[in-house]
Image: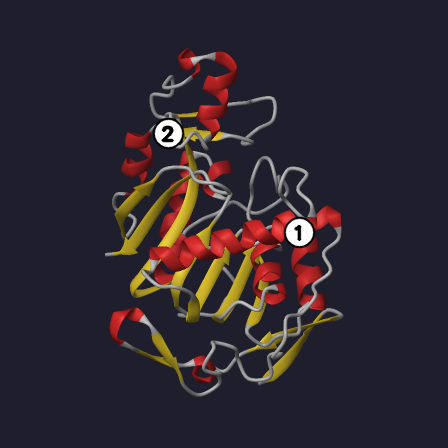
């Protein structure tokens, strides 16, 4: 396990063989070199860690820190579910738009994971995590991608954009919570293409998005709008619309048909479209094809 200095921050550098595991029946993995049986990497602590996160780095619409951590636990459960597993032990996860929530949940609740690689366009969040997290299972990378709302000074996303995770590196599972909810159609499609090479055969990609439709459980964005303004507020999106142009890409809203059309030809197959649930909007579960 080596380390390399980035500015005045230290960030872990992993040997590719350090976190190997072998498949077990039912999709579980058995830890081998570099991991403990519960999915912890060498040198990772045996007890939960307290990770202090300043309020300015927490996303979640006014949630307390404890509520944010609990939301992270729920999302990690959804990720395990999409692999058909009870936990993420032995799983290599790439989390795009990572923020701090999942890292904090894994550390503070001592949840099993193989490796966690987080990417975010918010450089201060990445700097904070690099400085605060010493667990060798974790690494964090800044992606200076353009987004009209969150990073207007960034570089346009292309299929050649460097994610920073290492040439040819792949993962069992990819996630993007509250990322595609803020992408216009061009970036929606480019992001799918950009992430496709990072998926291992048999892997999964779980992303959230806003669809212009009601849901049975009533947890979606448009369920809230219908409750406030009536059913006429729902179903008016033919393909895509920026629901609040005065706050660009706060709500990037898609019709179901157009969202599925955008996936076509990107190297992904649609496994499932999920209804909104507590802590998450509509979801697409994708598999590499």
Q: Nearer the viewer, residue 71 or 146?
A: 71
Query: Who's the residue at 69% across and 61% down the image?
Result: 127
Q: Which residue is mark 1?
A: 66
Check disc 1 and report its element: helix, strand or loop: helix
Vertical order, 48 against 71 (above or below): below
The percent coordinates of residue 156 (x first, y second) are: 52, 45
Q: CA distance from mark 2 to mark 1?
A: 28 Å
Q: Can I make out residue 144 in this image?
A: no
| SS category of the residue bearing label 2 | loop
Image position of 53 with respect to 263: above or below: below
**Any mark on residue 215, and which?**
2
Residue at 56 percent of width and 31 percent of height: 250
User: Which residue occupies 51% across, 37% down?
Assistant: 182
Q: Going 64% across and 78% down the picture, which residue do you hit?
A: 4
Tag on residue 111? none
Closer to the camera in the image, 159 or 278: 278
Count every numbered label the image shows and give the total.
Answer: 2
First-in-chain label (2 vs 1) = 1
x and y percentages locating residue 149 in the rendered image: 60, 35
Do we see residue 60 in this rendering? yes
The reply to whether the C-beta atoms of the residues labelled 2 and 1 are less than 8 Å apart is no
- Residue 105: quarter of image: bottom right
- Where the C terminus falls, by quadrant? bottom left
Q: In which quadrant of the rendered image does the N terminus lie?
A: bottom right
| Mark 2 neighbour density, 10 Å: few (under 14) some (14–19) many (20 or more) | some
Above or below residue 33? Residue 286 is: above
**Between 146 and 255, which is closer to the camera in this rendering?**
255
């Amino acid at each position: 396990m080596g380390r390399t200095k980035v500015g005045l921050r230290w960030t872990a550098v992993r040997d590719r063989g350090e976190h190997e595991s072998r498949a077990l029946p039912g999709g579980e993995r058995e830890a081998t070199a570099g991991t403990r049986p519960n999915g912890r990497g060498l040198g990772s602590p045996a007890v939960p860690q307290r990770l202090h996160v300043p309020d300015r780095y927490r996303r979640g619409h006014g949630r307390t820190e404890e509520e944010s951590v609990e939301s992270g636990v729920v999302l990690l459960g959804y990720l395990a579910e999409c692999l058909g597993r009870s936990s993420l032990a032995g799983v290599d996860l790439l989390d795009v738009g990572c923020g701090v929530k999942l890292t904090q949940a894994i550390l503070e609740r001592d949840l099993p994971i193989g490796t966690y690689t987080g990417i975010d366009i918010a450089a201060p969040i990445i700097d904070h995590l690099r400085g605060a997290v010493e667990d060798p299972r974790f690494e964090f990378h800044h992606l200076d991608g353009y987004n009209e709302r969150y990073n207007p000074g960034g570089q346009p996303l292309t299929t050649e954009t460097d994610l920073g995770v290492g040439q040819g590196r792949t993962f069992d599972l990819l996630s993007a919570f509250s990322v595609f909810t803020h992408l216009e159609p061009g970036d929606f499609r480019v992001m799918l293409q950009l992430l496709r090479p990072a998926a291992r055969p048999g892997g999964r990609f779980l992303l959230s998005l806003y669809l212009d439709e009601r849901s049975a459980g009533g947890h979606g964005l448009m369920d809230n709008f219908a409750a406030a303004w009536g059913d006429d507020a729902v179903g008016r999106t033919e393909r895509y619309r920026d629901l609040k142009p005065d706050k660009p890409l706060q709500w990037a809203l898609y019709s179901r048909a157009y969202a599925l059309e955008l996936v076509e030809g990107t190297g992904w197959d649609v496994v499932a479209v999920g209804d909104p649930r507590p802590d998450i909007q509509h979801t697409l579960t994708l598999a590499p094809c």
